[in-house]
Image (spheres, rainbow, N blue to C red):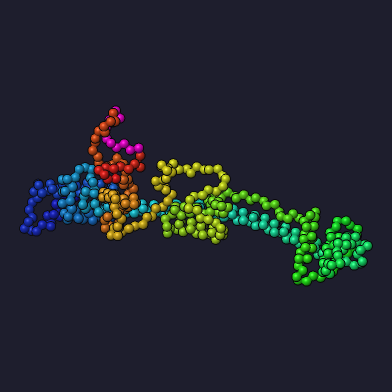
């Protein structure tokens, strides 16, 4: 490489400037060759082979023309081993491009994984939802059957009563009645000469009905036809009451009403019970970002439940089915004071993006962006904003963007602590959830 560079550099010189190579000039070219080889070797070890093979041809051509010498000399004079590719201008873009592509690929894989996890979660929720729907349908069918049986009993009892009245209420009578039917004579004897003809006939009909309902057997049949006007419905109702009362006390009559069987609410897997009605836990929607396929699927299940069971409810807080033994969730206990959770690990986050030009939140705290990290804004409503203040799309690798014991501080001895004050460092945090005020800033 050194000889080839000397030859090409000689060939590019104008005829009047060509002269034998001096040791100092040749040594500079030799140093550039060594630096270039070292940089290429480091590059080869840090990027995929296909990317290296694509880049090395162009780099070798540029090196042979001397274009890369200034950057190589700056690297040799200012750099400290091992080689930091980000400090070499002509390979910085190559490394950045490769890292950007890797991050995009990783992001795409994470997105695909999140989609698969979301789809599996929806499938699991759908399975539990279908189980509960089948349970609710079976419960509804059971209650419908009980109601139907009760209705049949009522209809059957009513039919028996109508048949009995058809047989017993003809009130037909033939004969002089007085000698052969002492019950009729008893009723007739209570009448006076001042009673109307209508009353006589009505009392006679009631007397005949009373004889028919008498349980004593062996008497001859009675045939009596009584005709009533429309304004004499009270007479008909009075006679019907006699028949109904007799029927209710008869051994052949069914019970007035079937004993109501208490049907316990069955256990539900996903849904819950609220005032005897199934309830859909609305917090299931929070597992998926609004507008996603998972969010739509959960919303569709909610609508299905309300369509099938119009009295169903939607609960804003998680519900539990009746009965059953509690099961461990299989996750560590991340709860903090008050029962809250710092992060829902099952939720796929896809927050709204606000352009920098339209960002108008009033800032309470601002942290400028550092290398490889975004800027942070805490607004007056204590909402946290993660910012990309560059003009290009940026992907950040997973890293800690804020924490405790990371700030600058001045060591001071705290008076009154006695032996407990050993180091003089005032950072005594029990956890990373503490609020820290430094120079009147949060």
Looking at the image, is 166 positioned above or below residue 322? below
In percent of width and height, residue 131 lies at 56, 53
In percent of width and height, residue 176 lies at 92, 66
In percent of width and height, residue 291 lies at 42, 59
**Looking at the image, which residue sits at the far right?**
179
Question: What residue span does the magenta drawing correspond to?
Answer: 419-430
Residue 226, by quadrant, is: bottom right
Residue at (27% x, 52% y) in the render: 96
Q: Relative to the observer, which residue lies in front, 393 or 374?
A: 374
Q: Relative to the observer, which residue lies in front, 326 or 154?
A: 154
Q: Relative to the observer, which residue lies in front, 196 or 76?
A: 196
**Is residue 327 rendered to the left or right of residue 31?**
right
**Is residue 356 rendered to the left or right of residue 237?**
left
**Looking at the image, which residue sits at the far top?**
419
Which quarter of the rendered picture does the C terminus lie within?
top left
**Is residue 309 rendered to the left or right of residue 189?**
left
Tell me which secondary structure the magenta stretch mostly adopts. loop
Looking at the image, is 302 positioned above or below residue 46? below
Residue at (29% x, 40% y) in the render: 405
**Looking at the image, which residue sits at the far bottom?**
229
Inspect the magenta stretch and tell me whether residue 355 lies in it. no
């Amino acid at each position: 490489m050194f000889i080839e560079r000397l030859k090409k550099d000689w060939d590019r010189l104008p005829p009047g400037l060509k002269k034998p190579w001096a040791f100092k000039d040749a040594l500079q070219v030799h140093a550039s060759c060594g630096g270039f080889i070292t940089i290429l070797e480091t590059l080869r070890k840090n990027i995929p082979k296909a990317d290296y093979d694509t880049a090395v041809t162009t780099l070798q051509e540029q090196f042979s023309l001397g274009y890369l010498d200034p950057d190589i000399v700056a690297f040799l004079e200012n750099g400290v081993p091992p080689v930091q590719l980000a400090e070499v201008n002509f390979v910085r873009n190559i490394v950045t491009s490769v890292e950007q592509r890797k991050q995009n690929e990783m992001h795409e894989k994470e997105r695909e994984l999140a989609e698969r996890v979301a789809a599996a979660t929806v499938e699991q929720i759908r399975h539990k939802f279908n189980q509960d729907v089948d349970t609710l349908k079976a419960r509804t069918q059971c209650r419908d059957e009980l109601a139907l049986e009760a209705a049949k009993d009522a209809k059957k009892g009513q039919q028996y009563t109508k048949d009995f009245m058809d047989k017993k209420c003809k009130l037909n009578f033939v004969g002089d009645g007085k000698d052969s039917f002492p019950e009729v004579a008893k009723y007739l004897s209570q009448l006076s000469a001042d009673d109307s003809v209508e009353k006589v006939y009505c009392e006679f009909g009631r007397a005949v009905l009373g004889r028919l309902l008498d349980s004593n057997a062996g008497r001859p049949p009675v045939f009596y036809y009584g005709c009533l006007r429309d304004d004499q419905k009270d007479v008909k109702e009075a006679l019907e009451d006699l028949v109904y009362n007799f029927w209710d006390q008869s051994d052949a009559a069914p019970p007035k009403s079937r004993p109501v069987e208490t049907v316990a609410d069955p256990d539900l897997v996903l849904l819950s019970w609220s005032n005897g009605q199934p309830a859909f836990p609305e917090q299931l929607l929070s597992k998926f970002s609004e507008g996603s396929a998972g969010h739509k699927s959960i919303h569709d299940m909610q609508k299905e439940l309300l369509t099938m069971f119009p009295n169903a409810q939607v609960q804003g807080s998680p519900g539990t089915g009746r009965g059953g033994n509690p099961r461990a969730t299989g996750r560590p206990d991340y709860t903090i004071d008050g029962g809250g959770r710092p992060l829902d690990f099952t939720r796929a986050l896809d927050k709204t993006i606000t352009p920098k030009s339209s960002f108008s939140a009033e800032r309470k705290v601002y942290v400028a962006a550092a290398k490889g990290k975004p800027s942070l804004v805490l607004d007056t409503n204590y909402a946290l904003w993660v910012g990309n203040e560059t003009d290009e799309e940026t992907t950040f690798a997973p890293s800690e963007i804020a924490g405790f014991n990371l700030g600058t501080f001045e060591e001071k001895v705290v008076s009154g602590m006695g032996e407990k004050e050993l180091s003089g460092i005032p950072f005594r945090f029990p956890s990373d959830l503490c609020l820290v005020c430094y120079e009147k800033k949060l």
